[in-house]
């Protein structure tokens, strides 16, 4: 059995070939993978049943168990995502700029794959398919480490994807699966072979990865998402929108965790919102003002406003105005996705220009923060940082760029010694 260092080194060698692989072969591999997953779904579902049974025995929390389940609908979703990726234009070799420096001396800036990407993700088997597919389309090799709860499902999916990809023309080693926690530590030491690490998990986990590796890390911190209900909000929009943001998938990083309510809207909003949330099984933690308006509210502490629940729990707080809401979000949020519900265009613009988050929304669910829903095909994660990529990271986020300079025998000495001068001209 190869060591992680040997696997990473093989992926590095493979990455040069994959970066130059024509789009039609990468698309053919994706098509073959989609067909293979559908043809062998019984094998995948059987593996997932083992994982789910073991998780239930271990007492895994219900939201995590929901993430773990991989049935007909999730398979259909990932296959649809693969088909969508095939239809997207090739991200490799896209010209970003083209400049003539002098006659017959032209500089181009073009996109190219990052190389070898190590992704450590949660117990979601569909994430493995999405990440592998994105890496194929973007011309990157992938080292994957999923949650141990999904070990059987991940192995079944990996084997099918690897076999289908190679049979369609992908180079051997374009994808690799890391299976143990100990191997993560080894992977973090492979700075000579791995170009980027993308950890998906808690803020503490991301920080641990950053502190224990010299490899660049694209961090995804907590998903402490907010909805602010402005004084001018349409309550008939606000209640279902907040419920969707919390209930549709409570364990997702883009689920709302804190609702901020303008004090002028509190009497109108909170009674119907409280009823709708309780009917959906959501526990409400609120400030004293909130508890005076709706019953059965647990007291909210300062800790609640810095907590990513990933569960059927939401904290609610009233604020004096939009500026207090913005200040709260910028202080306590994780810069993931935050929304304003308002009918006031000026208030919406104030909120969206001043809230420092990767996604700022008006009158729509925070659950739209997703690469598939953005039309990116899928995502390897959502970056809350500001360098390289931000928000859902799809194909473009898995590209870097290189400069290509084409000349006809020019030498720098001629320009340095004044025999020639530059004649810059933008060509793109």
Image (spheres, helix red, strand yellow):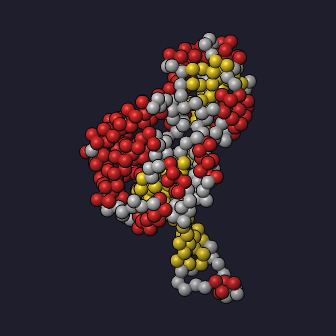
Q: Nearer the viewer, residue 52 or 246?
A: 52
User: Looking at the picture, how far across and down is residue 406, in whole percent?
Assistant: 52, 77
Total numbered labels: 0
Look at 25% across and 45% down and name the residue there: 39
Residue 368 left/right relative to 269: left
Q: Nearer the viewer, residue 173 or 56?
A: 56
Q: Residue furthest left?
A: 39
Q: Quadrant of residue 100?
A: bottom right
Residue 320 left/right relative to 172: right
The vertical placement of 33 against 269, above or below, is below
User: Looking at the picture, how far across and down is residue 377, in whole percent?
Assistant: 43, 47
The vertical placement of 97 against 298, above or below, is below
Residue 17 left/right relative to 416: left
Q: Quadrant of the C terminus?
A: bottom right
The vertical placement of 292 against 32, above or below, is above
The vertical placement of 313 against 184, above or below, is above
Residue 264 seen by the camera: no
Look at 36% across and 63% down and name the residue there: 172
Look at 59% across and 78% down and name the residue there: 102
User: Looking at the picture, how far across and down is residue 332, in whole percent?
Assistant: 69, 35
Q: Nearer the viewer, residue 251 or 98?
A: 251
User: Looking at the picture, how far across and down is residue 6, in whole percent?
Assistant: 45, 64
Residue 223 seen by the camera: yes
Look at 63% across and 21% down and name the residue there: 285
């Amino acid at each position: 059995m190869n060591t992680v260092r040997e696997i990473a080194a093989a992926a590095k060698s493979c990455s040069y070939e994959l970066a130059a692989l024509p789009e039609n072969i990468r698309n053919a591999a994706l098509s073959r993978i989609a067909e293979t997953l559908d043809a062998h779904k019984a094998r995948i579902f059987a593996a997932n049943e083992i994982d789910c049974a073991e998780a239930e025995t271990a007492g895994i929390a219900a939201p995590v168990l929901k993430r773990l389940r991989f049935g007909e609908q999730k398979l259909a979703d990932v296959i649809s995502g693969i088909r969508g990726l095939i239809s997207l234009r090739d991200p490799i070799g896209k010209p970003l700029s083209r400049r003539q420096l002098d006659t017959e001396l032209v500089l181009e800036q073009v996109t190219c794959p990052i190389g070898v990407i190590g992704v450590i993700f949660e117990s979601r088997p569909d994430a493995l398919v999405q990440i592998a597919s994105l890496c194929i389309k973007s011309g990157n090799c992938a080292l994957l480490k999923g949650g141990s709860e999904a070990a059987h499902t991940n192995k079944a999916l990996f084997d099918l994807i690897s076999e289908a990809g190679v049979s369609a023309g992908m180079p051997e080693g374009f994808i690799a699966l890391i299976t143990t926690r100990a191997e993560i530590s080894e992977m973090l030491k492979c700075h000579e072979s791995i170009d980027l690490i993308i950890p998906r998990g808690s803020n503490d986990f991301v920080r641990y990865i950053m502190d224990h590796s010299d490899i660049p890390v694209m961090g995804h911190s907590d998903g402490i998402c907010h909805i602010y209900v402005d004084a001018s909000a349409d309550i008939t929009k606000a209640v279902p929108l907040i419920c969707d943001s919390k209930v549709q998938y409570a364990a997702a990083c883009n689920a709302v965790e804190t609702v901020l309510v303008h004090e002028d809207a509190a009497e109108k909003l909170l009674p119907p919102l409280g009823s709708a949330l309780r009917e959906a099984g959501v526990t409400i933690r609120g400030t004293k003002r909130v508890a005076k308006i709706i019953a059965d509210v647990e007291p909210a502490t300062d800790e609640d406003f810095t907590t990513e629940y990933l569960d059927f729990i939401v904290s609610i707080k009233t604020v004096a105005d939009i500026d207090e809401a913005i200040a709260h979000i910028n202080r306590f949020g994780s810069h993931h996705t935050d929304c304003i519900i308002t009918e006031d265009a000026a208030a919406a613009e104030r909120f969206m220009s001043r809230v420092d988050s990767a996604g700022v929304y008006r009158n729509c669910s925070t659950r739209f923060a997703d690469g598939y829903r953005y039309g990116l095909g899928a995502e390897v994660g959502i970056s809350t940082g500001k360098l390289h990529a931000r928000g859902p990271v799809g194909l473009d986020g898995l590209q870097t760029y290189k400069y290509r300079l084409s000349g006809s025998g020019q030498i720098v000495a001629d320009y340095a010694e004044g025999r020639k001068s530059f004649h810059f001209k933008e060509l793109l």
